[in-house]
């Protein structure tokens, strides 16, 4: 579209739309708010401004001074604004984990990713403290944590849409769990705590979908009625499934963020029941390490006796450690994939033996509810009326039925667990009318 050339100012009003836009790169109009996105030259960030402030920018307000090229009059501003509104409109401005800078069409929603992901600096260098820390760890924990971290760094730094197990660090206080999480955060970058979203305590999850690292340090006990939902949500992230991104006061959109999950749990307060279940459907999706060796000051680094001092040391050593991890560290053979199913992760799943024993003690009622949820989801049911024998038959045809062998021997065991579920979770399981063969049960979708 051509404009009449009046010969005023630096801007050629006769310029085409593309020529006008070329003079003002990376400026967008948000249709939902009527505001403009303007890049900040000094730090690579951006500002969201209203129309009046944007006009001041175009007029060259010296107090703002964000734009290098400015016209001389308001008359010259109008065609620029009109073209930006017409050709640079987006619906939402949001950074998404693993997405590059620019505009992405996500399920018909135009999403502007203004910054994108920038990996931490990487270069050859010394990392004496980190070398001492990993040398101090038990060999099995050192191998598993370094191997997982290498795969996580490769996935996040290179924006690879692939699966990766969640890392669970289990152990009493003072065993180095928080320090290891700090190392992981230093290797990946921005993090968010997904506990509220995973547990279903908030409908808005936009914050966690923008962070490449989902990190929970000293995770609280999971409420019993939220256990299944919590780990189902975590499994969606592990499997790189699409998630609905929900904003407060804005429409949502579907996205597949590129993320890694790392969690620490303090077993000093008996937090064992918040662990994932050790069954076929879940065991390959986690790396679970038991850290039970009391952390002490490392030889040669006794002066690092404060969290802030240690944090400064990590910042100094991180570039060199990352270079070594990426270019020199090799994953041990015993942690390489052992079957075709593990190839998608790139790692063999590792669980500490003591952790397996505790995970096997997971509530039978919770395990039964997982079967019910899986059946209802697979058959797109909001409600299921069934007898205990119907549920036993569903378990009989599950690929991992050996994990539910207690339920296969008798419907009486199933009935006992259903009664427990009806008492503890009345919104999910309800006892119906009595029939000749027993009670009918009603399950409701979560």
Image: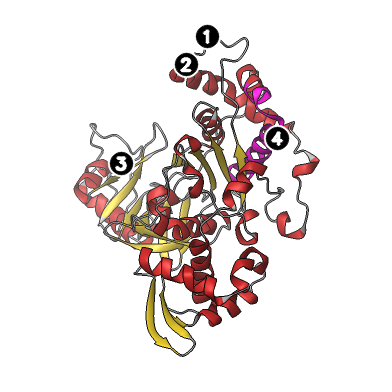
Residue in view at x 71 percent, y 49 percent: 346
Measure the alpha-carbon separation of dots 3 and 2. Answer: 47 Å
Q: Nearer the viewer, mark 4 or mark 3?
A: 4
Among numbered discs 3 and 2, the one appearing first in the sequence: 3
* Residue 17 percent across, percent down from the top left: 39, 58
Measure the alpha-carbon separation of dots 1 and 2. Answer: 9 Å
Helix, strand or loop status at disc 3? loop
Residue farthest to the right, as pictured? 333
Among numbered discs 4 and 2, the one appearing first in the sequence: 4
Among numbered discs 1 and 2, the one appearing first in the sequence: 1
Residue range in magenta is: 133-158
Residue in view at x 67 percent, y 32 percent: 142
Q: Is residue 367 magenta?
A: no
Q: Is residue 149 magenta?
A: yes
Q: Is residue 130 above or below residue 188?
A: above
Residue farthest to the bottom, as pictured? 436
Residue hosting label 3: 70
Q: Nearer the viewer, mark 3 or mark 1?
A: 1
Q: Residues within 10 Å of mark 1 (few under 14, many from 20)?
A: few
Measure the alpha-carbon separation of dots 4 and 1. Answer: 28 Å
Going by the image, does 278 lie left or right of 61?
A: right
Residue hosting label 1: 303
Residue hosting label 4: 140
Residue hosting label 2: 309
């Amino acid at each position: 579209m051509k404009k009449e050339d009046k010969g005023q100012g630096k801007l050629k009003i006769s310029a085409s739309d593309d020529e006008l836009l070329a003079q003002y790169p990376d400026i967008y109009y948000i249709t939902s708010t009527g505001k403009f996105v303007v890049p900040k030259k000094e730090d690579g960030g951006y500002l969201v401004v209203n129309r009046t402030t944007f006009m001041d920018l175009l007029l060259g307000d010296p107090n703002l001074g964000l734009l290098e090229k400015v016209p001389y009059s308001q008359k010259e501003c109008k065609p620029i604004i009109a073209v930006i509104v017409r050709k640079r409109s987006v619906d939402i401005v949001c950074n998404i984990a693993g997405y590059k800078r620019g505009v992405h069409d996500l399920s018909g929603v135009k999403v502007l990713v203004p910054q994108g992901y920038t990996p931490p600096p990487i270069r050859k260098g010394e990392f004496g403290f980190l070398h001492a820390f990993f040398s101090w760890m038990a060999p099995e924990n050192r191998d598993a944590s370094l191997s997982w971290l290498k795969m996580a760094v490769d996935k996040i730094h290179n924006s690879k849409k692939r699966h990766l197990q969640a890392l669970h660090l289990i152990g009493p206080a003072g065993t180095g769990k928080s320090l290891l999480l700090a190392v992981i955060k230093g290797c990946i970058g921005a993090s968010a705590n997904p506990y509220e979203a995973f547990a279903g305590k908030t409908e808005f999850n936009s914050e966690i979908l923008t962070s490449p690292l989902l990190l929970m340090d000293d995770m609280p006990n999971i409420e019993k009625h939220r256990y299944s939902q919590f780990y189902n949500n975590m499994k969606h992230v592990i499997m790189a499934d699409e998630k609905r991104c929900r904003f407060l006061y804005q429409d949502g959109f579907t996205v597949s963020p590129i993320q890694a999950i790392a969690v620490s749990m303090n077993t000093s307060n008996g937090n064992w029941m918040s662990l994932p279940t050790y069954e076929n459907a879940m065991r390959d999706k986690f790396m679970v390490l038991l850290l039970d060796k009391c952390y002490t000051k490392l030889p040669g680094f006794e002066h690092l006796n404060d969290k802030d001092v240690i944090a400064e040391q990590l910042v100094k050593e991180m570039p060199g450690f990352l270079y070594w991890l990426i270019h020199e560290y090799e994953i041990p053979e015993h942690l390489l994939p052992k079957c075709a199913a593990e190839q998608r992760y790139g790692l063999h799943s590792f669980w500490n033996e003591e952790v397996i024993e505790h995970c096997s003690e997971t509530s039978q009622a919770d395990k039964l509810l997982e079967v019910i949820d899986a059946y209802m989801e697979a058959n797109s049911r909001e409600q299921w009326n069934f007898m205990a024998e119907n549920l036993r038959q569903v378990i009989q045809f599950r690929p991992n039925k050996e994990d539910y062998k207690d339920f296969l021997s008798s419907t009486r065991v199933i009935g006992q667990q259903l009664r427990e579920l009806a008492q503890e979770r009345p919104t999910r399981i309800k006892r119906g009318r009595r029939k000749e063969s027993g009670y009918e049960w009603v399950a409701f979708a979560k």
